[in-house]
């Protein structure tokens, strides 16, 4: 991946953990908004990588099953601190919402929860500003001419007409073809790249481990009848097979835990509703389900098992795939394809900006004005994202809605 800076391409584990921990506390709005927060932090503020490199990572993670924003974070951690850096990045980004979800699950068993609090709506409004800021910056860098800008709009139309993971992957594939055939050779990518200290052979071994677990866990679950293994198997398979991000995981998880009697359906829906209001990855909903399960281990241990199992496939895929991609990326034709893919990523982000980001947040003139103020603070006044998040929550909480 690419980096336009002269800083060291390594960081301490504590630095990686703390920067992702901050993002874990303030990244409201779902996976598309998370990518906006990541871009502001790592492209604009810390300058760990360029817009081109960032779009490469986003495109790659759109291809893989699992939560794309978390996988981008793992890859960034991997590039800065190796495998331990990837773990530190995942822990930092995931820990806040995971802990809250487990605690919420334990409380929910004994008390009711108020939903639709006014200040929660402010968190959705600020997500509009965050995604708009990402679009503003990425479009100028990745679509600097009418050819790529035109394809970005076409990719937006295609992703809007096919609003699922298949549509996203199709637009990325078409972007690669577009780059090969329509972008001239002088539109080359920058040479400097983020490095991953992984060999191709090691990556292949990790991919083999991914498929071994995917094959053996169901067999072990069937023959041992052990609930901990069944729990791990169920959440590992969901993490390994879900495409399209957090919201797509809902029916898969529901099919795993409700018919089996592990979690009551009303409790499932209450927990899912609460997960929408939290920062960080929606996949931490798994921690809630493991905690409220009727079988033991549940509570803290059950939550940790479910959380680890649903994220493990993403971790293995990132470690396994990146070394192979880095080798392929050296070829000139692949670099041309990547330019087209980058344009399609802008189109995907533009489609997501309308649905679900805009449609789930902007219901009135006041919402629109608040989103504009948040965008002004982020883009032009360069106010830190967490301050804007608090500002929007306070404004809506005080009745601006």
Image (tube, rainbow, N blue to C red):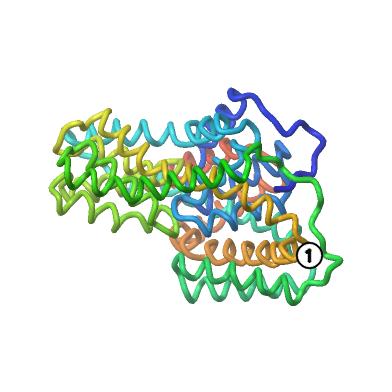
150 vs 25: above or below: below
**Which residue is located at x 21 percent, y 49 percent?**
257
Element marked by disc 1: loop
Q: Residue 264, position in %: x, y?
A: 15, 47
Tell me if 378 is positioned left or right of 29 in this view. Answer: right
Tell me if 219 is positioned left or right of 327 in this view. Answer: left
In front: 21, or 58? 58
**Which residue is located at x 59 percent, y 69 percent?**
173
**Can residue 115 be seen in this snapshot?**
no
292 vs 364: above or below: above
Tag count in the figure? 1
In front: 193, or 96? 193
Q: Residue 3, position in %: x, y?
A: 75, 44
Farthest right residue?
A: 186
Tell me if 114 is positioned left or right of 345 in this view. Answer: left
Mark 1 Cα shell of 10 Å, populated few (<14), some (14-19), many (≥20): few
In front: 203, or 147? 203
**Can residue 375 be seen in this snapshot?**
yes
Q: Residue 229, position in %: x, y?
A: 24, 39
**Which residue is located at x 62 percent, y 26 percent?**
15
Quadrant in which residue 103 is drawn = top left
Q: What residue sits right under mark 1 in the picture?
A: 144
**Which residue is located at x 78 percent, y 33 percent?**
7
Quadrant in which residue 337 is drawn = bottom right
Q: Residue 110, position in %: x, y?
A: 16, 33
Tell me if 130 is positioned left or right of 119 in this view. Answer: right
């Amino acid at each position: 991946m690419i980096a336009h800076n002269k800083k060291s391409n390594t960081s301490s584990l504590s630095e990686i953990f703390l920067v992702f921990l901050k993002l874990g506390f303030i990244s409201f709005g779902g996976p598309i908004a998370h990518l906006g927060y990541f871009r502001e932090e790592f492209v604009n503020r810390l300058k760990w990588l360029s817009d081109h490199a960032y779009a490469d990572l986003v495109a790659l993670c759109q291809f893989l099953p699992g939560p794309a924003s978390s996988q981008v974070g793992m890859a960034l951690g991997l590039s800065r601190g190796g495998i331990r850096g990837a773990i530190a990045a995942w822990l930092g980004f995931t820990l806040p919402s995971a802990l809250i979800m487990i605690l919420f699950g334990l409380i929910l068993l004994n008390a009711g929860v108020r939903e639709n609090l006014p200040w929660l709506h402010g968190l959705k409004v600020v997500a509009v500003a965050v995604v708009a800021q990402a679009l503003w910056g990425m479009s100028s860098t990745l679509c600097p001419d009418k050819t790529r800008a035109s394809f970005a709009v076409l990719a937006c139309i295609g992703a809007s007409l096919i609003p699922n993971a298949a549509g996203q992957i199709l637009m990325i594939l078409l972007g690669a073809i577009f780059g090969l055939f329509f972008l001239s050779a002088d539109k080359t990518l920058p040479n400097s790249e983020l490095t991953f200290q992984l060999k191709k052979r090691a990556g292949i071994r990790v991919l083999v481990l991914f498929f071994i677990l995917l094959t053996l866990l169901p067999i072990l679950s069937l023959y041992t009848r052990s609930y901990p293994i069944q729990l791990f198997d169920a959440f590992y398979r969901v993490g390994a097979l879900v495409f399209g991000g957090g919201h797509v995981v809902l029916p898969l998880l529901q099919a795993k835990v409700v018919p089996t009697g592990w979690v009551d359906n009303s409790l499932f829906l209450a927990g899912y509703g609460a997960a929408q209001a939290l920062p960080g990855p929606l996949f931490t909903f798994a921690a809630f389900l493991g905690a409220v399960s009727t079988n033991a281990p549940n509570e803290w241990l059950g939550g940790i098992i479910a959380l680890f199992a649903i994220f493990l496939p993403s971790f293995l895929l990132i470690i396994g795939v990146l070394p192979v991609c880095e080798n392929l990326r050296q070829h000139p034709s692949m670099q041309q394809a990547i330019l087209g893919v980058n344009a399609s990523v802008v189109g995907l982000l533009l489609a997501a900006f309308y649905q679900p980001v805009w449609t789930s947040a902007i219901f009135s003139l006041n919402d629109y004005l608040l989103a504009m103020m948040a965008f002004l603070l982020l883009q032009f006044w360069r106010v830190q994202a967490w301050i804007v998040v608090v500002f929007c929550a306070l404004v809506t909480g005080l009745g601006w809605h």
